[in-house]
C-alpha cells in the first residue's frame, strides 16, 4: 500500500536463441510518480543472439544505446562473452567467416564455386553433341575445372556411361539421344 514512486524492471543482458523471457508490470497511473524500465525484447527473427540491450525512453519509445545482434552460429571469440554455457558444434572455425571477416565461423574458408543452369531444347537438331561456348558466361575459360550434371527430360544421366565430356563438348550416347528431347545441364566451376 501507499504511493509507489519508482518501479524498475530487471535488465536482460542476453537472450539465447530458443529461450523466451517475458516480464509484465501492471500499475495505475495515479499510484506511480515515476517509472523507469529497460527496452522490451524485440527481435526480427529467431536466427540471432541478443548481445546487449540497454536504455528505453518512455517518451519516444526508442533505444537510447546501441543494440548489437550476432549471428546465431557462435564464433570462438563470441563463446567467451556468453552468459551461461555454449557449445560450438562441428569443427573449429576456419580463418574466414561466411561474410569475409577476420575471425571465423564454422564451415568457412572453402573454395568459392559458381553453379549455373543451362537448358537446351532439341540441341542442333538430331545431333547428340552439346557444345558450351566459353564466352557464354557458363564457363569463364575453356580449360576451367567443372563438375557437370546432365538431365534428359528430367532424368539424371550417368557420366561416362550415358554422356562424355571433352573440352566444351558434351556427347550424349546415341542410344539414348533422340530428336526433340530436352537437356538440362547444371555446371559447377571454381571461381
Image (cartoon, rainbow, N blue to C red):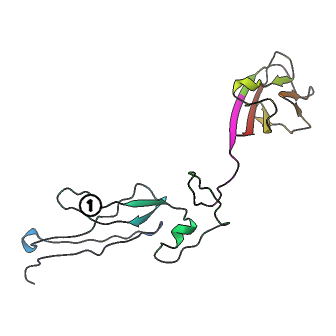
Q: Is residue 70 above or below residue 12?
A: above
- Give the side of residue 59 with respect to residue 50, left or right: left
User: Measuring 30% from the left and 64% from the top, which residue is drawn there?
Assistant: 40
Q: Position of residue 163 (x, y in %)?
A: 88, 33
Q: Is residue 181 above or below residue 159?
A: above
Q: Position of residue 8 (x, y in %)?
A: 22, 75
Q: Is residue 124 above or below residue 93?
A: above
- Give the side of residue 121 with respect to residue 51, left or right: right
User: Measuring 58% from the left and 51% from the top, which residue is drawn there?
Assistant: 100
- Give the side of residue 186 with respect to residue 78, left or right: right
- Give the side of residue 149 with respect to residue 11, left or right: right
Task: Find out whether residue 117 is within the magenta segment.
Answer: yes
Residue in the foreground of this view, choosing between 140 and 38: 140
Q: Quadrant of residue 149?
A: top right
Q: Quadrant of residue 117?
A: top right
Q: Quadrant of residue 159?
A: top right
User: Measuring 27% from the left and 68% from the top, which residue is drawn there?
Assistant: 38
Q: Position of residue 136 (x, y in %)?
A: 71, 24
The residue wearing badge 1 is 64
Task: Find out whether residue 51 is within the magenta segment.
Answer: no
Range of residues picked out in magenta = 105-118
User: Measuring 80% from the left and 39% from the top, which residue is drawn there?
Assistant: 145
Residue in the foreground of this view, choosing between 142 and 157: 142
Q: Quadrant of the N terminus?
A: bottom left
* Label 1: element kind: loop
Amino acid at each position: 500500500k501507499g504511493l509507489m514512486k519508482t518501479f524498475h524492471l530487471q535488465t536482460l543482458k542476453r537472450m539465447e536463441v530458443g529461450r523466451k523471457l517475458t516480464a509484465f508490470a501492471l500499475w495505475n497511473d495515479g499510484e506511480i510518480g515515476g517509472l523507469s524500465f529497460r527496452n522490451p525484447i524485440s527481435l526480427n527473427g529467431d536466427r540471432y543472439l541478443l548481445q546487449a540491450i540497454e536504455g528505453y525512453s518512455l517518451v519516444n519509445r526508442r533505444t537510447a544505446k546501441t543494440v548489437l545482434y550476432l549471428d546465431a552460429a557462435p564464433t570462438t571469440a563470441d563463446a567467451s562473452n556468453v552468459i551461461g554455457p555454449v557449445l560450438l558444434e562441428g569443427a573449429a572455425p576456419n580463418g574466414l567467416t561466411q561474410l569475409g571477416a577476420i575471425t571465423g565461423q564454422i564451415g568457412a574458408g572453402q573454395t568459392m564455386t559458381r553453379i549455373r543452369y543451362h537448358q537446351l531444347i532439341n540441341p542442333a537438331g538430331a545431333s547428340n553433341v552439346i557444345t558450351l561456348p566459353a564466352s557464354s558466361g557458363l564457363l569463364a575459360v575453356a580449360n576451367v575445372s567443372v563438375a557437370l550434371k546432365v538431365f534428359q527430360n528430367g532424368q539424371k544421366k550417368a557420366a561416362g556411361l550415358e554422356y562424355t565430356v571433352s573440352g566444351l563438348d558434351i556427347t550424349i550416347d546415341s542410344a539414348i539421344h533422340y530428336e526433340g528431347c530436352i537437356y538440362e545441364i547444371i555446371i559447377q566451376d571454381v571461381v
